[in-house]
Image (cartoon, rainbow, N blue to C red):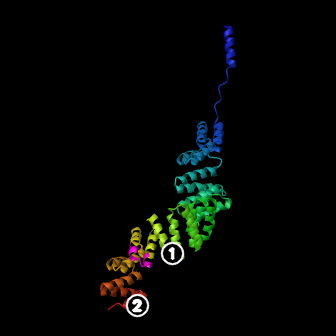
Amino acid sequence: MKITIIMLGLLLFEAPEAPAQTTAKEWFDKGKSFQDSKKYTEAESAYKKAVLLKPDYTEALHELGWCYNEQAMYNEALDALKKEEKNSPKDKAQNYFEIGYSYKMLTEYDEALSYLTKATSLDPNYGLAYKEIGNCYFSKKEYQKALDNYNKYRDLKPEINDSKFYYNKGWCENELGLFSDATMSLRKSTDLDNTNSIAYSELGYAYYKLKFNDEAISNYQKAIALNKADHASILGIADTYYDNLKNYDSAMAYYERGVRLTQKNKGAYYRLGWCYNDKERFKDAVFPLQQALLLDPEYAKARTDLGYSYYKLKDYDNALSQFRNIMEKDSKDELSRYYAGFCYYLKGDQPALQKVYNELKELGSKYAETLSKYIK
């Protein structure tokens, strides 16, 4: 019996110790290691275990939220980051930034702006927060506010290698009529990424507005070379020929090409119809002008040109239908009354001709004198 007790004691003495449980800090460190290696799924798992052991572990909650954001799991990120917020994190600005970023990616821009603004109020030098505030305002189409915040980000971080940032900034500048500034921003965007067709297109637009026509056409062509279906750039070249160079043959060719790719640009349809009328191709002008009016029934210029096409085709009833539509809505429109007068004359309707003549005379229009010659 004594021997048995002694042997049992020896066995207990020599038994290996049970492995110690992994601590929350150790799981956190594992998570950081995975995170640094961009193994975000493994990092997420480790951070979850750290939080399971220590629910108020703000650092682990923050990194867990960051990993969720990196994996586009924005609702899960908010859950972790809001828990971090409740536990008073050491770096509140970073917490607010990540929450704001999650909301931005969920397109909840007002919530995003609330948190991102809190981040900059705590840390006025938080450059990335200004950038994301700018992105929120950009998405809300509040371009001046977007540009103000983009400029703050640029001032805080002069060395920026983000092509999309410069594209967004250039877009805002174009929208605000700052075309010279836009060319500088958009050139930086294309320098950083020469495969981005929309940046070349936007740069072409800035040059078009500045009437730097060769540069405009060159950049539009670069955009088209990258994306043959880029109707915006094709129509941009058309606008350059139409507005700046008054080369209507070239404009017409590009408008024809552009409207084959998009049926939603009323201005392109109108200008194509105008070019056909200018070339006395009145029958060809009818369809694009009708399309412009289908897109916008209140498009008076397109309606006037459509009426003119019918007038030149001697289809006076359809012409008058267009002109009357304009005259009923605009008591001061001179051109519709002028051409309506000719239609009335050719139809032998002298009372109607007299009426539009009187209206033009009352408006002090130069067209009244011309029409007076047809009144019997």
Q: Is residue 10 above or below residue 121?
A: above
Circle 2 sits on which residue?
369
* Label drawn at residue 242: 1
Q: Under tag 2, what secondary structure?
A: helix
Q: Nearer the viewer, residue 345 or 256?
A: 256
Among the two numbered marks 1 and 2 on one chain, the one whose residue lies closer to the N terminus? 1
Image quarter in which the N terminus is found: top right
Q: Are marks 1 and 2 in contact (CB under 8 Å)?
A: no
Q: Residues within 10 Å of mark 2 (few under 14, many from 20)?
A: few
What secondary structure predominates along the stretch shown in magenta? helix
10 left or right of 229? right
Question: For residue 285: magenta?
Answer: yes
Q: Is residue 177 visible?
A: no
Image quarter in which the C terminus is found: bottom left
Residue 365 position in % (x across, y down): 42, 87
The single residue placed furthest to the top in the displayed view is 1
**Stretch of the chain drawn in magenta:** 276-286
* C-alpha gap between disc 1 and disc 2: 31 Å
- Badge 1 amino acid: Tyr
Question: For residue 371: magenta?
Answer: no
Q: Is residue 357 above or below residue 94?
A: below
Residue 53 position in % (x across, y down): 60, 36
Q: Under tag 1, what secondary structure?
A: helix
Q: Residues within 10 Å of mark 1 (few under 14, many from 20)?
A: many
